[in-house]
């Protein structure tokens, strides 16, 4: 589409410009007694308005999934983001997300469900034992990270919401509040609020995850506070941030990017090196952090490396057609 915001983003925006701390430095800091809590932070990364959630995280958690790859440093993961509600530049969310007020927070449950209504975040998070999952995170713009998320399986929230047998899809909606999210004042590019969705079998897959933290800390505003979706086998735009509504639907929802640029972004958005984006190849990716002289380019893995866990969901489907 001619008004797609990606038409206005220079290619340099998808290439990191500095080399950040590597994991050895993080481990060294931890050994010195500082731990991950001593990693560099910025003003918008702090969320002092949710002490109950901080207390929940401090109770401890178990790492239930991980990959044998170095973590992306905290600074890279919290200062190089797509969150267009705060601007179209990669650095905009970290600079502007301090305006977001992530507490108090509720999620509206709607559609084909036995329990419609508002569900406070305290009721969503507190019954669950938090888990840490280290997932690969792959952006459709061909850059990637490895991030340790804190949260709980999406399936447990779905069970609590009690969808009816008619529910075939799960639709997610981001907060719409231009005062808190100044990027939403730019109305020519996206029809706000941001909407994403999953098929029900995708949503209840054990990999689908609701994150409320990362790196052993509360989730920073610019990364989707106070609660976001993480679907590690799909491109990053499926992992919707700052969720305020979950709707159970009988029919496939109209999702933001599938409406905005249907020739570029489909409903499924599975990571697939064999299907190119119309404007670039998806066969390789840039693993962040990196620099002009160290562009850490690696081969893209089918389903982002989670093929064994999710390929059965798409048996018999033409993944070049259902992209």
Image (cartoon, rainbow, N blue to C red):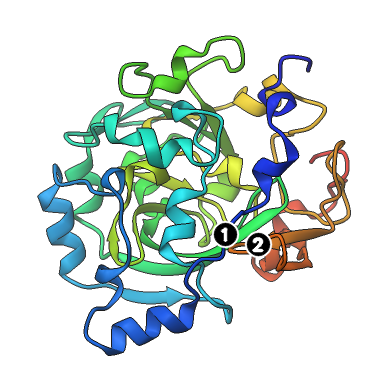
Indicate whether 15 appears above or below 119. Answer: below
Mark 1–mark 2 CB contact (< 8 Å): yes
Identify the residue shown where x is 41% and y is 46%.
223
Depth check: 256 or 216 in front?
A: 216
Identify the residue shown where x is 16% and y is 57%.
54
Give the x, y percent position of residue 200: 56, 43
Which label sits on residue 127?
none
Identify the residue shown where x is 32% and y is 76%.
62
Q: Outermost residue toward the top?
A: 188
Give the x, y percent position of residue 311: 73, 61
* Mark toward the start of the polypeptide (1 vs 2): 1
Image quadrant assignment for residue 145: bottom right
Q: Outermost residue toward the bottom?
A: 31
Q: Which residue is mark 1?
A: 18
Distance from disc 1 to disc 2, alpha carbons, whole Å, reads 5 Å
Query: Quadrant location of the N terminus?
Result: top right
Image quadrant assignment for residue 177: top left
Q: Is residue 41 left or right of residue 201?
A: left
Q: Which residue is mark 2?
A: 291
């Amino acid at each position: 589409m001619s008004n797609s915001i990606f038409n206005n983003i220079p290619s340099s925006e998808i290439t990191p410009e500095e080399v950040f701390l590597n994991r050895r430095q993080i481990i060294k800091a931890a050994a010195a007694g500082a731990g991950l809590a001593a990693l560099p932070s910025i003003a918008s990364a702090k969320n002092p308005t949710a002490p109950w959630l901080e207390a929940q995280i401090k109770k401890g958690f178990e790492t239930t999934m991980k990959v044998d790859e170095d973590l992306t440093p905290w600074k890279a993961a919290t200062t190089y983001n797509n969150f267009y509600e705060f601007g179209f530049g990669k650095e905009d969310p970290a600079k502007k997300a301090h305006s977001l007020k992530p507490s108090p927070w509720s999620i509206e449950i709607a559609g084909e469900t036995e329990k419609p209504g508002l569900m406070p975040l305290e009721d969503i998070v507190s019954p669950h034992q938090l888990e840490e999952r280290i997932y690969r995170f792959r952006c459709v713009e061909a850059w990637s990270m490895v991030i340790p998320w804190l949260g709980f399986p999406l399936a447990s929230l779905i069970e609590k919401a009690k969808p009816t047998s008619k529910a075939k899809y799960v639709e997610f909606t981001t907060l719409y509040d231009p005062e808190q999210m100044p990027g939403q004042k730019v109305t020519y590019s996206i029809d706000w609020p941001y909407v994403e969705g999953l098929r029900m079998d995708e949503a209840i897959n054990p990999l689908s995850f609701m994150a409320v933290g990362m790196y052993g800390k509360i989730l920073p505003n610019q990364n989707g506070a106070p609660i976001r979706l993480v679907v590690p086998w799909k491109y990053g735009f499926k992992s919707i941030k700052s969720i305020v509504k979950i709707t159970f639907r009988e029919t496939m929802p109209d999702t933001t990017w599938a409406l905005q640029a249907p020739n570029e972004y489909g409903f499924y958005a599975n990571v697939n090196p064999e299907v190119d984006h119309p404007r670039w190849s998806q066969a390789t990716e840039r693993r962040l952090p990196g620099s002009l002289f160290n562009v850490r380019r690696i081969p893209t893995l089918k389903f982002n490396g989670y093929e064994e866990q999710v390929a059965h969901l798409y048996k018999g489907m033409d993944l070049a057609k259902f992209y």
